[in-house]
Image (cartoon, rainbow, N blue to C red):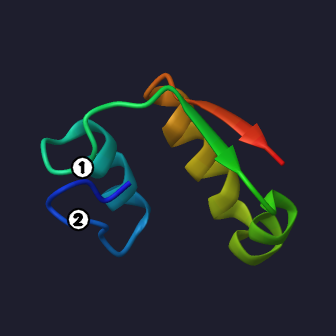
Amino acid sequence: MNGTSGYFGHNIYSLDDCLRGDFGIKSFSELNWRNHKRSKKLLKTKFKQIVEIFEDHNIKVLLN
């Protein structure tokens, strides 16, 4: 998701910026999240927030 500028950020707000700003990738409509159960365990409440950010940007999240 870092695009040509190499932007990642260091917090959940950076993800939102990356998806709506001019420094991330231009567009995608689907995210295949592999090992989402492990991520959910590690991220705890942030996991739901991350999924919601993608959905707010009309990106379908596939949990695999």
56 or 36: which is nearer to us? 36
Direction from residue 7 to residue 49 in the image, left or right = right
Could you tell me residue 47's position as x and y percent? 68, 58
Identify which residue is drawn at 49% across, 22% down. Answer: 58
Could you tell me if the residues under marks 2 and 1 are in contact, i.e. CB atoms within 8 Å? yes
46 above or below 50?
A: below
Question: Within 10 angstroms of label 1, few (less than 14), some, or many (20 or more) residues?
Answer: some
Could you tell me residue 52's position as x and y percent? 58, 38
Identify which residue is drawn at 25% across, 35% down. Answer: 26
Direction from residue 22 to residue 60 in the image, left or right = right
Query: What's the residue type where badge 1 is placed?
Result: Gly
14 or 62: which is nearer to us? 62
Q: Which residue is mark 2?
A: 7
Q: What is the number of callouts on the image?
A: 2
Q: Secondary structure at mark 1?
A: loop
Query: What's the residue type where badge 2 is placed?
Result: Tyr
Direction from residue 9 to residue 1 in the image, left or right = right
Circle number at residue 24: 1
